[in-house]
Amino acid sequence: MDLIKTIALYIFIILIPIVGATQIISVKQDGTGDYTNIQDAVDASSTGDTVLVWPGTYYETIDMDDHNIVLASLNLTSGEEQYIHNTIIDGSIGEQNPCIRAIYGADFTVAGFTIQNGRGRDNLPGSSGGGFFIDNSNLIIINCIIKNNFARYSGGGIYSARSNLFLTGTLIKENHAATSGGGGITFAVIDSSQKLNFDTINLCSVFNNFACKGSDFYIGRYTSPMTVKLDTFSVSNPGRQHSYAVSDQHVFPVDDKIQIQMNNFIRQSVNSDIYVDPLGDDNNDGLTPVTPLKSLTKAVQIIHSDSLQKNTIFLTNGTYSPSLTGEYFPLGLWTNINIIGEDKDSTILDAENFSNHFTGSRLEESIDLEKFTLINGNGDLSSFLGVGSISMGFTDSISLYKILFKQNVAKSINSLALGNCSYVKINEVQFEDNIYGKSLGVQSSWYSPEYPRLTDSVFIMNCIFNNNVPHPDSTIGLGGALNTSSIGDLYNDSLISIISNSLFINNNSDNGSYPSNIISVFDYAKAIFVNCTFANNHSNLNEKSALFATFGYGAKSEVYNSIFYGNYPREIYLGSNEDTCKLSIYNSLVSGGIENIGGDLNMNVLVYDTTNIDDNPLFLGMWNHPYQITDNSPCINTGTLANIPEYIKLPEYDLAGNPRVYGDSIDMGAYEWDPTIVGFHEIGPGTNADASQSLIKASPNPFYQDTYIEIEPKQLSTEAKVEVYDNYGKLVKTLITTQLNNKVKVLWRGDNNSGNPLPSGIYHVVMFYGDKEVESLKVVKR
């Protein structure tokens, strides 16, 4: 007799005295038993009874209430494994139905079932416990398969709170917990007297479950350190992706609280770079571009890094989504593991409005995200705490580069939320067409003597916030671009956000009842805006509404070299509850001037420097960068470099790729006026109808890989030569040497005369007639 049969019969023999003193209630779907469904049999049972279930699929949610019984298939009496597979409790009968639920002092055993397709019920924020929801009870699970269950919040397979749980011979696989943790098991208690135990002889297996942290195990506060001995686990070297435990006083990870011992594992952990392609296969090793995995989810599960090794997941262009590549969003973000796409516009992570994309664990560090689009994230509209795309807390050294957040939705922050993080760099990131909450939230709102990690520096540069709007249901409202705050007087100046060279346009914020601003700096936060353009944004009609608001308790904002124009109902609001707020504005264009700044200017401090102007900035109004300024703009050379805080480093290029400083001084706004940009000085205000037409044009300019150089002869039948020089005057490329009779277009691939790619920088295309220089054009290779 095999081990499973032996153990099953042994358990049954132990239960004989109980069974003999009570009754066995049979459940058979053919009507020959006492009942045809399990719930009726459970309701009819008394303490010590056994509800014995014959094979079949039972589409039920079993509510154990306070029953103290044994619920078993024929596996309990026969030891035959087939009864585990063909006696099924299936929870797919509604939207929120765990397969088995027990609260208020139940003390029971479940033996020999397949438990599948359950969904967590709303007993906690979100939903918890897809297969089992156990609270304030005692449960023994014997020889079961728990698979394909889901919880929106925690405990996809099993959620156990304030309970004792013992498992023997049980397989827990392919369960999913979305927004919190514990895809396989979540075990949460209120004191250390409640225990989670696994049989060390009839071993369990736990593998291939999914969650943003602790995919297989999530161990909550007040649990004692434990060693779990398993037959099979997910990976050879478990990390926080797989087993996650938190400290007793604070919800920070404690790595030595749970130790996994295994006889076997499904996949070898990989301490190296991993390649992923939508046309790949998750059975590949993922170690080379020609053997890629298919899903980002699988890559996150098997990749492993340590303090000495930083690894990268490389994503090939394509769409990664639950329906196309089998993604289980949200995914976790882990120390020393980067995720880098091939191209921002062509590498797409689509959450299909199911959940957000990433949820970062606490105390992680050194994470780089680059070159992909995050679309259709959903932060669960039932919760004001929801985040639509990426949520990170207590994380060090985060870098986002060339990321597009698009069409994400959440009440609180619809795209990117950063709480109590340190050294965050957000560069060339776009927030576009996102809905409901603010697109970016940066907050320092919690303090722990054990982990005094606070958001102390956030650098936002070269970013675009465009058309982020309220929820279509006008009664829900909100919307807008940026929130930054630091709650509590302990945190004065602890949060400093530096926003430079960024564009805020066409955003809308309206919730009808409360101040709803496009940009909010409040509650002891400090924000510095340098060379930003704020135009055509719309807030609600509340008297405290504005494009840009500094308010609350002791908030401080400084603005340099920026443009505020065409925003409604006013450009700026300055307000305070108790502690004085301060706003300082230098070398900026503010439409309407100081008269367009609302709020209590007596209680608060407004520094409105004489270098500020009230004028029309003369935006270009066309092409890919309509908020560039034109020839006669009053913003040209009117910014300041000398007065900007010395710790702020401006980017090398503006949003159009032009050098950030051109001419006598820096300009106001996110764009630098540059007369070398082809056609730029020929259009819009300041046009000189008699100006000579350019003989050389480049498109695109700036460019990344190649650009077309268009050459028009000044006089026909003339020997011409067109060459490219670097910024040091060295000849690097000869484009043509020919007699010009017509307009010529030449493709330059950004290479030199040897065909080798040239580095990024400024180059000069020069046309000669004989030895005479006729015209030159500056181009920028990114």
Image (tube, grey):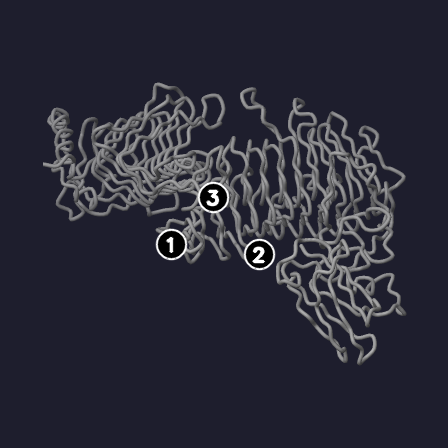
Looking at this view, is 96 or 736 the one in front?
Answer: 736
Q: Nearer the viewer, mark 2 or mark 1?
A: 1
Screen quadrant of the C terminus: bottom right
Q: Nearer the viewer, residue 188 or 229?
A: 229
**Looking at the image, which residue is at 45% across and 24% down?**
247
| Residue 230 in picture, x, y percent from top left | 28, 33
User: In which quarter of the view is residue 742 placed?
Assistant: bottom right
- Type of the residue with mark 1: Asp
- Which residue appears at 84% of the width and 46% of the height? 665
Left/right of residue 255 with respect to residue 370 in the rendered view: left
Where 144 falls versus 48 (above or below)?
below
For badge 3, the amino acid type reads Pro
Per the image, the residue denoted by label 2 is: 345
- Asked whether disc 2 touches disc 3, contact meaning CB atoms under 8 Å apart, the reply is no
Instruction: Please name the amino acid that badge 2 sits on.
Output: Asp
Numbered circle sitting on residue 281:
1
The spot of residue 590 in percent (x, y) is 83, 45
Most foreground residue, 612 or 422: 422
Q: Read off the residue under disc 3.
A: 330
Give the number of the mark in front: 3 or 1.
1
Marked residue nearer the N-terminal end (2 or 1) = 1
